[in-house]
């Protein structure tokens, strides 16, 4: 990528990141990490194009939507697609990459198997609220500070997954989230209201932050040996998780 492109993207992300509304030009430039003269020049050019405007209080307001679905330099998206294809093939299920986007879960990759027992409604770009505390929401939210959830989320809007959907007060929801081990696989054996059972692991970047969730989705039907079935899925998911995370420290493995 050219230096010019990377500098423009730095400003775009500074303008649309968390708590970006109502920043001064100086604050936008500081968030971007660019030299002041470069940052101010790009903001002026964006204003001339009508992509930003200044409020009466001289704050910079974005007139566009810009968001990176996955942000992890060093991770090739093809590696995630390959992981999904491998999981789908070996387990005869759907495999997915899902990210937390604001207050929603956003599907980035969906790899369905022609012989899986149930077809998914989810597709790349599909989005649903993260207030439904199924396995993927619980795991994603477990990686967020409780203080952030209490400040930025509607703590009275959480509810259980499954056919017996039930509203949760914050004490219940917080306990469900706190019970999650972010390093382990999460799953809901009973499945959701659509008859889908998901297993998921978090993919962590070099700094320890969550990049995305890697999931396996199957029909929520009874299995003969539940413990063995869960262990088999876990083995495949944890192997892919390890391979992807190892690639961050060994760039040659991404090729």
Image: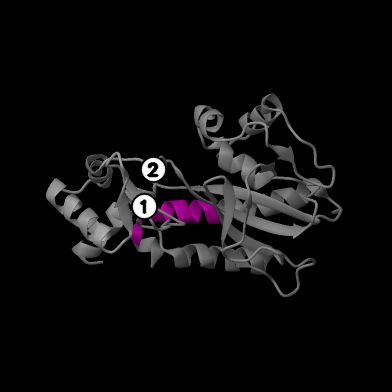
Disc with the residue nearer the chain's start (2 vs 1): 2
Q: Residue at x 18, y 50 (%)?
A: 40
Q: Magenta span covers which residues?
A: 240-251
Residue 236: horizontal and vertical position, in percent? Answer: 62, 56
Q: Secondary structure at mark 2?
A: loop
Taking 52 as reference, is 103 left or right?
right
Residue tagged by mark 1? 62
Position of 241 relative to 20 (above/below): below
Q: Residue at x 57, y 39 (%)?
A: 141
Q: Secondary structure at mark 1?
A: strand
For residue 44, the mark is none
* Cβ atoms at labels 2 and 1 below 8 Å apart: yes
Query: Does any portion of residue 10 appear in the rendered image?
Result: yes
Quadrant occupied by the N terminus: bottom left
Could you tell me how far apart the alpha carbons at marks 2 and 1 are, in whole angstroms? 8 Å
Position of 226 relative to 216 (above/below): above
Residue 184: horizontal and vertical position, in percent? Answer: 60, 41
Point out the residue furthest to the bottom here: 114
Residue 88: horizontal and vertical position, in percent? Answer: 65, 66
Residue 244: horizontal and vertical position, in percent? Answer: 47, 56
Position of 114 relative to 241 (above/below): below
Residue tagged by mark 2? 21
Point out the residue furthest to the left here: 37
Within the magenta stretch, is there residue 247? yes
Q: Residues within 10 Å of mark 1 (few under 14, many from 20)?
A: many
Exactly how many numbered labels are in the figure? 2
């Amino acid at each position: 990528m050219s230096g010019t492109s990377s500098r423009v993207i730095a400003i775009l992300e500074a303008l649309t990141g968390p708590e970006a509304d109502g920043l001064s030009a100086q604050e936008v430039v500081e968030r971007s990490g660019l030299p002041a003269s470069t940052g101010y020049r790009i903001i002026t050019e964006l204003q001339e194009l009508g992509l930003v405007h200044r409020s009466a209080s001289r704050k910079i307001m974005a007139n566009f939507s810009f968001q990176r679905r996955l942000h992890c330099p060093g991770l090739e998206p093809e590696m995630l697609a390959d992981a999904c294809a491998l999981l789908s093939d070996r387990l005869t299920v759907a495999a997915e990459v899902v990210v937390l986007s604001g207050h929603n879960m956003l599907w980035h990759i969906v790899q369905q198997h022609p012989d899986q027992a149930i077809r998914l409604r989810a597709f790349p770009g599909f989005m649903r609220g993260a207030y439904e505390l199924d396995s993927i929401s619980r795991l994603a939210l477990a990686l967020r500070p409780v203080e952030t959830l209490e400040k930025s989320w509607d703590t009275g809007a959480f509810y259980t997954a499954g056919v017996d959907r039930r509203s949760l007060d914050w004490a219940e929801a917080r306990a469900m989230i706190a019970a999650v081990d972010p390093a382990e696989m999460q799953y809901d054996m009973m499945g959701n209201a659509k008859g889908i059972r998901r297993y998921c692991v978090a993919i962590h970047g070099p700094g320890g932050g969550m990049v995305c969730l890697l999931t396996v989705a199957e029909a929520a039907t009874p299995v003969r040996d539940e413990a063995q079935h869960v262990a088999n899925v876990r083995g495949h998911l944890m192997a892919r998780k390890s391979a992807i995370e190892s690639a961050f420290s060994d760039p040659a493995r991404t090729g």
